[in-house]
Image (cartoon, rainbow, N blue to C red):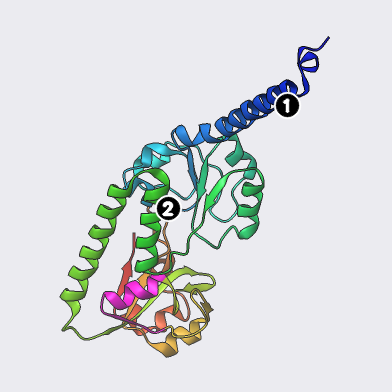
Amino acid sequence: MNRVSALPQIGRRSALSACLALLVVACRSSREAPENQPARVVSLSPSTTEAVFAIGAGHLLVGRSSTCDVPKEAVRLPSVGGFASPSVEAIIALRPTLVVGARGPAGPSLEETLRARSIATFFPETESVAQIEAMLFELGKKLGAEEGASSAAVAIRKRVDEVTRAVANQPKIKAILMFDVAPIFVTGPGSFPDELLRLAGGDNVIREGGAYPTVGIEHVIALDPDVILDGVAHADGSAGGVTAMRESAGWKEMRAVREGRIRALD
């Protein structure tokens, strides 16, 4: 005979209550166990990868996107695919407790897919210095690196103040920042690079079309920027972007190109 059923009614209830209590404790313990383990973080964007290292939590990273190559320690981590189209299977295989990344390229479906598998996500807006500071503080809370986050935010604010003081009495320079040349993909109003341009004493000639519009070459010629900031990166170090287009039709008609005022960004 089952020992529980042999007990008096009150005894059976007490025994069942005790069993249920043990089950609740066991379930709670199994859910809380991961919180007591070191975090396992996969970062899907260069900005969040650098942020995790900047706050002193780089040792918690177990994966990255193929475009995350700074600092050099990040390159040693397994890649889970591109910035805009990472492999969900590769992410899951790394058993992350948190997946972080810049909001936008992969879309909300990625977050939904990961959350459905009980993987926490953090895809913050980072289109201003203030939002980047907020991202650092939130990462610090999630990864137990609050002090490092505070130090990183202070360093950013200090650098911003140094730059703005240096250009405070200088004339504004008409500038355009390009991320690609075919088509011409530029930074527009409301974007983080647009804010950086203004902080550095620039006057962004792109004033409409959204944060990252594409424009025609005739439009750029008409805007007549003083300086072209070339943000088209070539990993192998070869010439690319605006520099490679200097002698091409349309490009050589731009005053900034003719006068050699192209500034490549690393």
Q: Is residue 111 left or right of residue 233?
A: right
Queried whether the magenta region covers residue 198, the answer comes back as yes
Q: Can residue 260 be seen here?
A: no
In front here: 102 or 217? 102
Looking at the figure, which quarter contains the C terminus?
Answer: bottom left
Q: Position of residue 118 (x, y in %)?
A: 62, 43
Q: Can residue 261 be seen here?
A: yes
Q: Residue furthest bottom?
A: 222
- Of the numbered discs 1 and 2, the one sitting upstream in the chain is 1
Start-end of magenta stretch: 192-205
Q: Residue at x 36, y 42 (%)?
A: 57
Q: Is residue 93 left or right of residue 75?
A: right
Q: Disc 1 marks which residue?
A: 13
In front here: 65 or 99? 99
Q: Residue at x 62, y 47 (%)?
A: 114
Q: Position of residue 219 (x, y in %)?
A: 48, 86
When the figure is inspected, residue 177 is found, relative to residue 79, above or below; the finding is below
Residue 81's disc is: none
Residue 48's disc is: 2
Which kind of residue does numbered mark 1 sit on?
Answer: Arg
The residues bearing labels 1 and 2 have C-alpha atoms spaced at a distance of 53 Å
Q: Position of residue 236 (x, y in %)?
A: 41, 50
For the residue labelled by badge 2, is the local secondary structure a helix, a strand or a loop? Answer: helix
In front here: 133 or 70? 133
Q: Residues within 10 Å of mark 1 (few under 14, many from 20)?
A: some
